[in-house]
Image: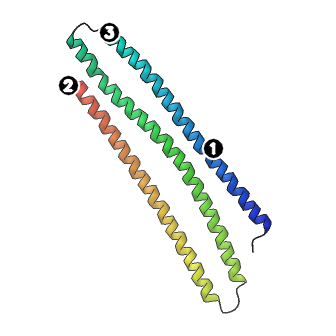
Amino acid sequence: MLTVEQVMASHKANLETLFGLTTKAFEGVEKIVELNLTASKAALAEANEHTQSLLSVKDAQELLALQSGLFQPLAEKTVAYSRHLYDIASGTGAEFTKNFEGQATDAQKKFMGLVDNAAKNAPAGSEAAVAIMKSTVAAANNALESVQKAVKQATEVAESNFNAVATTATNAAKQPAKKR
């Protein structure tokens, strides 16, 4: 049976976890805002510089050369921005996953303690029911571990795909710049 102290300790731990996760979420939002501000300032400065360059163009060939020189840096900056945004999102997600896994492990241990305690205090003849309950809990734990492994693998595949797309985009932007 759970005591009042155990229930209060559980509630306190849950509140601390909630506030910790909220803080991590806000940190992620702050990083995204900072990234967007930095990118916006850089884009504004580059637009000003490009406008000044356009005003000094003397002929059509110089204009074409100026325009073609913009594509590669733009693609590279877009990839870098996307990469930074992805890193922020995956880092924040990793914090949530780590916390969830820790909480799940702790909850599993506590529940197994309750099952063991119930088994010790079970009336004679209920050994089969206790064995079934322990087997069910073990199967649920195995299923949870399988899901966690699948999520980790899916995350690794998504990151690999992101990296491949980013590399392809950067290489595609470099090719037209070299041909001209």
Label 1: which secondary element: helix
Quadrant of the frame with the N terminus: bottom right
- Mark 3 residue type: Leu
Q: Amino acid at mark 2?
A: Lys
Q: Is residue 171 above or below residue 52?
A: below
Q: Earlier in the sequence, mark 1 or mark 2?
A: 1
Residue type, numbered disc 1: Thr
Q: Nearer the viewer, mark 1 or mark 2?
A: 1
Residue nearest the viewer, comparing 10 with 117: 10
Q: Earlier in the sequence, mark 2 or mark 3?
A: 3
Q: Which image quadrant is residue 83 in? A: top left
Residue under the image location 50 percent in, 28 percent down: 37
Q: Sort mark 3 into few (<14), some (14-19) or many (20+) by Cα contacts within 10 Å.
A: few
Which residue is depicted at the point 66% across and 77% down? Answer: 115
User: Does 47 appear above or below 152?
Assistant: above
Left or right position of 55 against 132: left
Which residue is identified by label 3?
55
Q: Which residue is mark 2?
A: 179
Compute the Cα span from label 1 to label 2. Answer: 49 Å
Q: Is residue 19 above or below residue 52?
A: below
Tell me the element at label 3.
helix
Instruction: State if disc 2 and disc 1 touch (CB < 8 Å).
Output: no
Residue 136: x %, y % from top left? 55, 78
Q: Secondary structure at mark 2?
A: helix
Question: What number is the disc on residue 23?
Answer: 1
Q: Where does the C terminus fall, quadrant-wise? A: top left
Residue 144: image location, x then y, percent:
52, 66
Tell me, for residue 45, which label it has, or none.
Answer: none
